[in-house]
Image (spheres, rainbow, N blue to C red):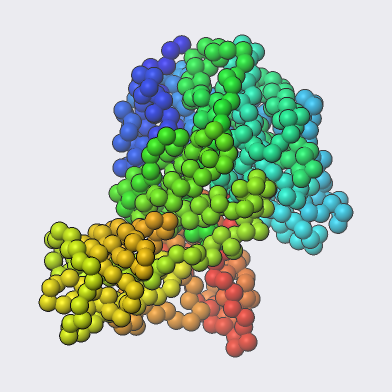
Amino acid sequence: MTIATLLVANRGEIACRIFRTCRDLGITTVAVYSDADADALHVREADLAVRLPGAAPADTYLRGDLVVAAALAAGADAVHPGYGFLSENAVFAAAVQDAGLTWVGPPVKAIELMASKTRAKELMAGAGVPLLAPVDPATASADDLPLLLKAASGGGGRGMRIVRELAALPGELLAAAAEAASAFGDGEVFAEPYVERGRHVEVQVMADAYDTVWALGTRDCSLQRRHQKVIEEAPAPGLEEALRTRLHDAAVAAARAVGYRGAGTVEFLVSAEGRPYFLEMNTRLQVEHPVTEAVFGVDLVALQLRVAEGEPLPAPEPPSASGHAVEARLYAEDPARDWQPQTGALLTLEVPDGPGLRQDTGYVGGDTIGVHYDPMLAKVIAHAPTRTEAVRLLAGALERARIHGPVTNRALLVRSLRHPDFAAARLDTGFYERHLADLTAPGDGDPATAALAATLAEAVRATAHGTGPAPTRFGAWRNVPSQPQVKRYRSEPDGTEHEVAYRTPRTGTPEPYDAPGVRVLAATPDRVILELGDLTRHFSLTRDRDRVYVDTAGAAYTFTALPRFTDPATRTDPGSLLAPMPGTVVRLAEGLAAGAAVEAGQPLIWLEAMKMEHRILAPASGTLTALHAAPGDQVEVGALLAVVQEDLDATPVPASVPEETA
């Protein structure tokens, strides 16, 4: 059966990526969208689009019945699930086929067999795939520690906990089960040994209906935050050839054991001693599939469509691998603040293009990042003959990118790629646990000079009333009797304040005040060139209301212009608990009400936003004097949720702590 019209049951960058292949193949594309995504990039890029009324995923992208109805209404003859949402839902896959549509995915039975991690492990044991021995939490002893608790269904780190103390096991079991039930509708949790400093290594498989199964090399996905991948690469570096062969053979055996067809990924944990253990099989395309495509020169989506149409893979063996590829996930989040997701207008998203570079994105400049979905903006991929070249190419592209709007993890990605441990391929899943403080510490940049550039550009703009005059070039400035003026900025997101003095002589061209060794070579509202000693630096500037974005070689800065005096209205009462982001109140502590006694660090309110759950904690022991939150409430950033009147001897604690990310 030839696919003529394909509906993608997903959103964002994966929908856009699938549409790209469909355009190459001449296939008509259909998008589905929630009300929150009415103007999203994937909707704009599709040939046709069908609305799913509502905004929350449970009301839209997770409604299989609505998605099937949308496919029929649009005249589609096939459905591709992408990843996430319904991609590994056997009931949805069956519903697609029952509606007479082609399912671009594995057989329903294969999805069912791999849907439960506990059942999948039993099946893999029979196929000879290496496994970690399960641990019964009811009989676990100190000798079994540390333990890893995992949800039997779902993925993305939800319901996952590391237990290092036996006394903490019962509470962590309850918390993991509750989160698993909330995220996947299944509260089953199992335990297995936690492998310290293990590597996350996976094998891409592709299978057809004619008994051909390809093992398309390995990927290392060890750099993770909250059990979700951040940087991935192919092939996994530093593996002995015997281990690679064992991983390939185990992945093929896993696929054959369930009669697999299409694209899938078999994930392993590799111990520091080089022993592999089966984790799970993802019965779908992976976020990190581009690195495999780059190394093997294939289009995995095109192969998925080919297999779904009943065609065999083009050869009995996969093509030869060439070079090395690295992918970085660009997130709207603040790594220095517990990976807190960010929302708001994305003014600019420009990543350099060139040989060996690729970008998969669901956003462009001018789009808005909302609260309902994953905060990933884009994936940037680099491919080069060697790992060293690929890593350098990717780090350079990210560093030169222009990204204006919410805080992102761009600086963390650049520093991670250039970290000595990453450069030497000393990889394991504890990388960020060990290095996050260093990777998010203030860098070697020069924000004070960037603030000076922002001040000069703003002064030119003000003088010209926003008309943007032609560049004024001069080699130095003259001492004139005009009085200096002061601009104040706050660096984002670290909060450092900068005060810049300047003056504007009768020539109308602003000059820095009391800045020896600095010469202004050019100044316009959007570009400033400064000579700093023997070094000339170029600064480009972009404004959005009170925000100024300054880009220069090797660094990018965001400043908020501050008023000369603090506004008393911005102050809040002591003990006020404010929403750290827009989101939904999902639950309150049991019995929480005004007048209740609370303990320092006690979770009071659970707020969910962008697939991350945040616990709002009591800042100190005391009395809850006001409660303004209830389950189901939609709150904006900065909204007052509650007030705690603390005891005099109370010890302050952070106000919110994020939970696992899906």
Q: Could you tell me residue 483's position as x and y percent?
A: 20, 84
The spot of residue 235 in percent (x, y) is 62, 34
Question: Can residue 103 be seen at all in this image of the molecule?
Answer: no
Q: Say which residue appears at 65% left-offset and 38% top-offset.
A: 237
Residue that appears at 82% across and 46% down: 136
Image side of residue 401 versus residue 589, left or right: left
Q: How many marks?
A: 0
Q: Residue furthest bottom?
A: 648
Q: Nearer the viewer, residue 248 or 144?
A: 248
Q: Nearer the viewer, residue 596 or 276?
A: 276
Q: Is residue 270 visible?
A: yes
Q: Residue at x 36, y 24 (%)?
A: 23
Residue sticking out furthest to the front: 534
Residue 367 or 593: which is nearer the viewer? 367
* Residue 560: percent from left, percent from top: 34, 68
**Where residue 87 appears, x then y in whole percent?**
53, 33
Query: Where 298 falls versus 657 (above or below)?
Result: above
Above or below 265: residue 224: below
| 95 up-or-down from 149: above or below | above
- Residue at image point 53% right, 78% down: 644
| Left or right placement of residue 533 versus residue 394 in this view | left
